[in-house]
Each structure stands twice: as C-alpha cells, then as structure tokens.
Image (tube, grey):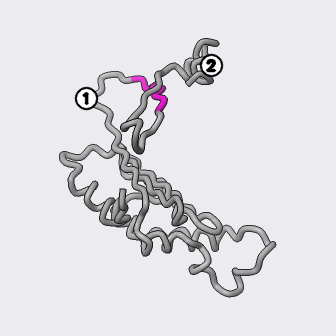
Amino acid sequence: MEYLRMHREKGSREINGNGYTLGPVTGDHWFVWVADRTVREDVVGTDRVINIMMFDIDEKVRKCFYTGQYKADDDKKEGEGENIEEIKRISEEMTRRAGIDQLVPGAVIDSRAFEPCGYSMNAILYNSYSTMHITPEASCSYASFETNAKLASYHSLINNVVRTFRPKR
C-alpha cells in the first residue's frame, strides 16, 4: 500500500484508490487495492463482480491440470520450445475434462495450460466476462473463479463452481 500511495501522491490517476483487507486476519485473507477509473454515464443498475477463491482442491480435479498426460509421444521431446498448436489443444482438453466449459456455457473461451502444470482461462459472453486461475500442486492447490455476469441469483453458479473443484476450503 505504501508503494501504491507513493504513486498516487505523484499524481498517477490510474492508481487513485484505496486498500482493503478481506477476511479475518487470523485466517485466509486478501489485501486488495481498489482503483476504479470506470466512467459511468446514464448507467442502469450497478456493477458487480463475484470472486470464488478455493484452496485444497480435490486430488482428482488437480490431476486434470498437469500437461504431461495430454501430450502425444512425439510432443514429449524436451528442448524444442513451445508448440503453439499443441498447447492450444491441451488447453482446450483441460477445459473440457475439468468441466470448465460447462461453467460458462455459450461463452468464447481463451484458455492456457502451463508446463508442467497450471491453467488460466478468460471467457466472454455478451457483456460479461469470466476468468479462472488454477495452481494444482498438492502443497498449495488453489483455484479462483471471477465473473461480472449479472444474475438474478448466484446460488447455482456458486454451487456449480464449488462442485467442479471440490475444495476443502
């Protein structure tokens, strides 16, 4: 916060905001800096974003996000650099196998698998976005889901996301 305040004091409007702590300081919590530069003219309704942060995701789910199982034998050669088409294929397969495509039905999905493990996804559906980040290592497994979709109720979305990853926390 000290660093961000320093830039704000130097006149950087991009960083004009404030810091917050979300969650109990004795448990899982996040430090968040909110810098909102959105210009709102004649807007009906309010902006909303939902974030679901999950720790200790289910072992079976975690295994979906390791790239080695998706590679063909001729793709397992080391030292040849990234094969963009192969990464795209693996990313799309991870999306399907984990059920992420069912969390954002109808959306245009841009997913990315990481070597040797990990995953990120951005999806667009009309005027809303969804994004996910997954770190599957057993010692620090984590998955996040964020969207600005405006729904009458978030009950089903939250249940579906939690059911997909089966986190312990």
Left or right: 67 as drawn, with respect to 126:
right
Can residue 30 be seen here? The reply is yes
Left or right: 166 as drawn, with respect to 83:
left
Dot 1 or dot 2, earlier in sequence: 2
Q: Which amino acid does label 2 sit on?
A: His
Q: How crowded is mark 1: few (under 14 residues within 10 Å), some or many (20 or more)?
A: few
Q: Where is residue 54 in the image (x, y as percent from the top left)?
A: 40, 55
Q: Residues within 10 Å of mark 2 (few under 14, many from 20)?
A: some
Left or right: 46 as drawn, with respect to 135:
left
Q: Where is residue 114 in the image (x, y as percent from the top left)?
A: 61, 64
Figure quadrant of residue 45:
top left
Left or right: 157 as drawn, with respect to 14:
left
Most common secondary structure along the magenta stretch = loop
- Quarter of the picture holding the N terminus: top right
**Which element is circle 2 on?**
helix
Q: Where is residue 105 in the image (x, y as percent from the top left)?
A: 33, 62
Q: Distance between the residues labelled 1 and 2?
A: 33 Å
Q: Position of residue 88 (x, y in %)?
A: 59, 68
Q: Which residue is drawn at 54% across and 68% down?
A: 91
Q: Is residue 153 magenta?
A: no
For the record, the magenta segment spans 32-39
Residue placed farthest to the left in the image?
152
- The residue pinned by badge 2 equals 7
Q: Which amino acid does label 1 sit on?
A: Val
The label nearer to you, 1 versus 2, is: 2
Residue placed farthest to the right in the image?
79
Q: Which residue is drawn at 62% across and 24% down?
A: 3
Task: Determine which of the numbered discs, if any, sits on residue 44 in the image.
Answer: 1
Q: Residue at x 22, y 57 (%)?
A: 156
**Which element is circle 1 on?**
loop
Q: Is residue 33 magenta?
A: yes
Figure quadrant of residue 12:
top right
